[in-house]
Amino acid sequence: MYIPSAFRVEDASKLAAFIQRHSFATFITDDGTAPFASHLPMLFRPDAGSHGTLVSHMARANPQWQHFASGGEALSIFHGPHSYISPSWYQTEPAVPTWNYVAVHAYGIPTVISEHERVVSLLSETILAYEADFEQPWPGALPDEFRDKLMRGIVAFEIPIARIEGKFKLGQNRPAADTQGVFDALSHSDNANSQAVAQLMLTECKVDKGT
């Protein structure tokens, strides 16, 4: 992805935290004739491989997993908060509208996980990860026969990350007064996405929270 230097993020811990928080990914492969995308929850294992490893599963009826046989690289896109930016929030003139957003792209070669126990473990790990914030998490206990019947309808896979790119486009290239104006407007917005962008600006940009 195109990343101007002002927006590039290479901090591994920051990228890991982002992927773990925004783990519902757009997963893209190529069947040799055209791109193909699925939308999947992905777990990130930061200690598996030089850049970590992604693990997920999809319906067996989804033809995308068959693309893995080519050995080609796949792209997983993790989307964060985003917001329209009005030039009326800038001090600098003239100016034009833009869009601020955060995204992380992870590339790697996916392979199918075929071992039964590994698939069971992955599904349990996925349930635990997404139930963890609930007051009464669902334990995920299912009869083995019922669970195994459902498992025959999915394909689990893993992607050791070969390279990863982070783009935090939050106005870091603008004069301080412009960045502050954007933060003030977004932080007072009723839109949850806009407020989330403002919160990211607190750590990525030099803005005054109290303005």
Image: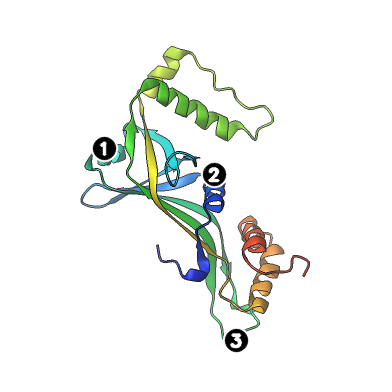
Marks 1,3: beta carbons within 8 A: no
Task: Identify the residue shown where x is 57% and y is 66%.
Answer: 170
Residue 59: percent from the left, percent from the top?
Answer: 36, 33
Quadrant containing the C terminus is: bottom right
Q: Dot 3 surroundings within 10 Å: few (below 14), some, or many (20 or more)?
A: few
Furthest-front residue in view?
50
Quadrant containing the N terminus is: bottom left
Q: What is the C-alpha distance between the residues marked 3 and 2?
A: 39 Å
Using the image as rendered, state which of residue 49 and residue 146 is in the foreground.
Answer: 49
Among numbered discs 1 and 2, the one appearing first in the sequence: 2
Which residue is identified by label 2?
A: 20
Q: Secondary structure at mark 1?
A: helix
Marks 1,2: beta carbons within 8 A: no
Q: What is the C-alpha distance between the residues marked 1 and 3?
A: 53 Å
Q: Dot 2 surroundings within 10 Å: few (below 14), some, or many (20 or more)?
A: some
As drawn, the label of residue 169 is none
Which residue is identified by label 1?
A: 66
Which residue is identified by label 3?
A: 93
Residue 75: percent from the left, percent from the top?
Answer: 37, 50
Tell me which amino acid carries mark 1.
Gln
Q: Secondary structure at mark 3?
A: loop
Tell me which amino acid carries mark 2.
Gln
Task: Identify the residue shown where x is 38% and y is 42%.
Answer: 160
Q: Quadrant of residue 184?
A: bottom right
Q: In the drawing, does residue 152 fall left or right of residue 3?
A: left
Q: Quadrant of residue 119?
A: top left
Q: Mark 3 or 2, which is nearer the eye?
A: 2
Using the image as rendered, state which of residue 203 and residue 86 is in the foreground.
Answer: 203
Tell me which amino acid carries mark 3.
Glu
Q: In the drawing, does residue 121 fall left or right of residue 70?
A: right
Q: Is residue 141 above or below residue 82?
A: above
Residue 84: percent from the left, percent from the top?
Answer: 56, 67
